[in-house]
Image (spheres, helix red, strand yellow):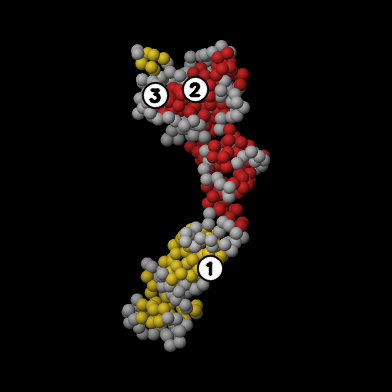
Amino acid sequence: MTKLNKKILSLMLALVMVIGSMGISMAALMDVGGIPEEQAILRLEGLKILEGYGDGTFLPNNLITREEYAAVITRAKRIQPISGNTIFGDVPSTRWSAQYINVAEQADLIKGRGIINGINTFDPISNISYEEAVTIVVRALGYETLAQSSGGYPNGYLLVAAQKGLLAGVSGTLGMKAPRAMVAQLTFNALEIPQQNGTYLFNELRMINAAAKSTDWTGINLATFAAAGINGVTASNLANLKSTLEGAANGTNQNWSPTDIQGVVDSVVDSLAPKITYINGTEFELVVPNTPGTFVLVVTVGGVDVSAQVVNGRVIMPPFLGLGAIGTAKLYNLNDLNTPIVSENFVRKLPSGITGNMFATTAGAAPFIIVTEVLGIDTVTFSGTFTAGQTVSIDGIGMTLVTGTTAALTATEVVGLLTPA
């Protein structure tokens, strides 16, 4: 298999795992399968707008509170929560929902109950009603003025919601408390309906999904991905990301969440990152992200460096002259030999299929040598009689004998300039 094919296969396997993670997340919500709001719930779960619980349930029939829905609509609008004191006397700054209530109130999405017993009251733990939830979504889409001119609260908001399609699949009546499944469907509908200004909630994400389906990326750039909450997209990986998303979409709008696409971005970035993989002997496998011939691999063993200008693929380095089990391989750009692009440690080993039987190359030295390593320590054994600690020179490199036995050991390391038997 060619190096290019390996890269593509690796990337696509990573992509399958990323996209497959949606199925894992969906299956984790064990109590929504088959209910009318299932698609809406899973979509909001993927977007982290309205999520299930840690035990794998969503509890679709449970009621939702006013503070919980303030958090939901804030996430749907993608507006930054504001910590600190609120204008409501019953929502202290230490309450988990204060940051969401703050921003939702300041954005005129949700209002308080008014002055009750001398306190400006929000009533955070009361269950939100059907008409309150509808009103909040109508405001989020920018149709407040239209709703007011159509009769105001609550009928004007309900009328506009019906006209815009917000109530599709939503069964509610005035005064009823809204269950989680209902508000999930209502909020999901809001993602599919244009706002008053013509854009959509999660507009950039919608654009990316549509482009992956159609393969037309007109108007989509680095800023689009950043606005969709997707990090790590750069000019150098954008083309690879687009083609990968197109292949995964296969002509269908997948409705990927930011998390789904982020996983693909991470795999693309990883596939383009420079890599050093030690094979054995003096052989390495390299992936370099730029023009062949502009990179230098420097291998250091026992304080001795060897280097070579390299390109993608398998590289056979010059012999390692230094002693020691551990080496370091560093990849540099030829224009900057001070800062390595990537650095990897490796444990030296013989090429596959070669045992420890070696001939010394220096005249006068014992002709037969076995080299092995145990826990990073070089052990050299000659066929002659030597004592522990005795030193012999092979090509001018000193070697300390740890043992004098001639056991048939299997070598994992070549020490010095030796010729395989």
353 versus 337 height, above or below: below
Seen from this angle, which residue lies furthest bottom? Answer: 364
74 versus 385 height, above or below: above
In space, the residues marked 1 and 2 are separated at their CA atoms by 63 Å
Looking at the rendered structure, the number of numbered marks drawn on it comes to 3
Which amino acid, by three-letter code, is at mark 3? Thr
Residue at mark 2: 109
Residue at mark 1: 308
Q: Give the mark, 3 or 1, whose residue is nearer the N terminus.
A: 3
State the mark number for residue 235. Answer: none
Q: Give the mark, 1 or 2, whose residue is nearer the N terminus.
A: 2
Residue 260 appears in the rendering: no
- The image shows residue 166 at horizontal and vertical percentages of 58, 22
What SS does tag 1 mark?
Answer: strand
Residue drawn at point x = 36 percent, y = 81 percent: 391
Q: Residues within 10 Å of mark 2 (few under 14, many from 20)?
A: many
Residue drawn at point x = 56 percent, y = 53 percent: 272
Residue drawn at point x = 51 percent, y = 60 percent: 336
Residue drawn at point x = 58 percent, y = 38 percent: 224
Residue at mark 3: 86
- The image shows residue 117 at horizontal and vertical percentages of 35, 12
Q: Residues within 10 Å of mark 1 (few under 14, many from 20)?
A: some
- Residue 416, by quadrant, is bottom left
Question: Depth check: 416 or 247 in front?
Answer: 416
Which amino acid, by three-letter code, is at mark 2? Leu
Which amino acid, by three-letter code, is at mark 1? Ala
- Residue 201, by quadrant, is top right
What SS does tag 3 mark?
Answer: loop
In space, the residues marked 3 and 2 are separated at their CA atoms by 15 Å
Residue 245 appears in the rendering: yes
